[in-house]
Amino acid sequence: MLQTAIQGAKNLLIGLGVTFKNMISKPVTFQYPDVKRTMPQRFRGRHFLNRDENGLERCVGCSLCSINCPVGCIHVVAAENDPRNPVSPGERYAAVYEINLLRCIYCGYCEEACPVDAVVLREHYELADYDRDKYIATKSDLLVYPEPNRFRHDILGNTIKI
Ligand code: SF4
Ligand code: SF4
């Protein structure tokens, strides 16, 4: 009887020790969404389309990203640039550029295939939404300037500056 009571008290103290240890240790959880986790630099999250230093769209509509996409979720329609008012530095630009973010497997092949560093995947991971139509990212969703890391994608699918 006495032995059982001693064992019970010992177990209680061990349990309390674990509780107190966790009370004073640094939490591993975040107060999301007030606090955001910093993702590794090479994390492949949301896509962006870059502009160059002159503000022109880097994308020249070559479709290499689309051809190399293993799930066929990029749709590019190229058009000829007007030399007096070019959209991109090349002969052509992407008149239509769409990515189906629900079909995408975030492999990064599009980023690797792009010869002009136009399409990039960055650390933005807040991609949840209630509306499937929001997952067709168009040029207006994807184009940012000057640096994608200064933008994020809010819960409604809008690109907002941070
Ligand atoms: S990350 Fe992969 S699956 Fe997604 S668009 Fe790029 S190539 Fe396609
Ligand atoms: S994003 Fe790059 S690979 Fe894709 S169409 Fe534009 S220039 Fe070509």
Image (cartoon, grey):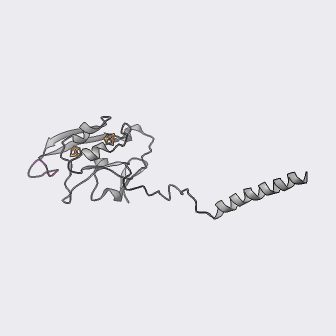
Q: How many marks?
A: 0
For this view, does 23 lie left or right of residue 108?
right
Q: Residue furthest right?
A: 1
Q: Examine the rendered structure and indicate whether residue 18 appears above or below residue 98.
A: below
- Examine the rendering and report whether any part of residue 122 can be seen: yes
Part of the protein shown in magenta:
82-91
State which image quarter holds ligand 2: top left
Q: Which image quarter is the C terminus in?
A: bottom left
For this view, does 85 lie left or right of residue 126?
left
Quarter of the image for residue 128 reads top left
Judged by its main secondary structure, the magenta piece is loop
**Residue shown at 49%/59% (left/top)?**
35
Q: Position of residue 92 (x, y in %)?
A: 14, 45
For this view, does 148 lie left or right of residue 114?
right
Quarter of the image for residue 94 reads top left
For this view, does 93 lie left or right of residue 129?
left
**Residue shown at 64%/60% (left/top)?**
22
Q: Residue furthest top?
A: 71
Give the camera-side residue of 37 and 13. 13
Q: Residue furthest bottom?
A: 24
Q: Position of residue 61 (x, y in %)?
A: 19, 43
Q: Position of residue 141 (x, y in %)?
A: 32, 48
Give the camera-side residue of 52 and 138. 52
Is 72 covered by the magenta stretch?
Answer: no
Q: Residue furthest left?
A: 83
- Examine the rendering and report whether any part of residue 138 can be seen: no
Give the camera-side residue of 6 and 115. 6
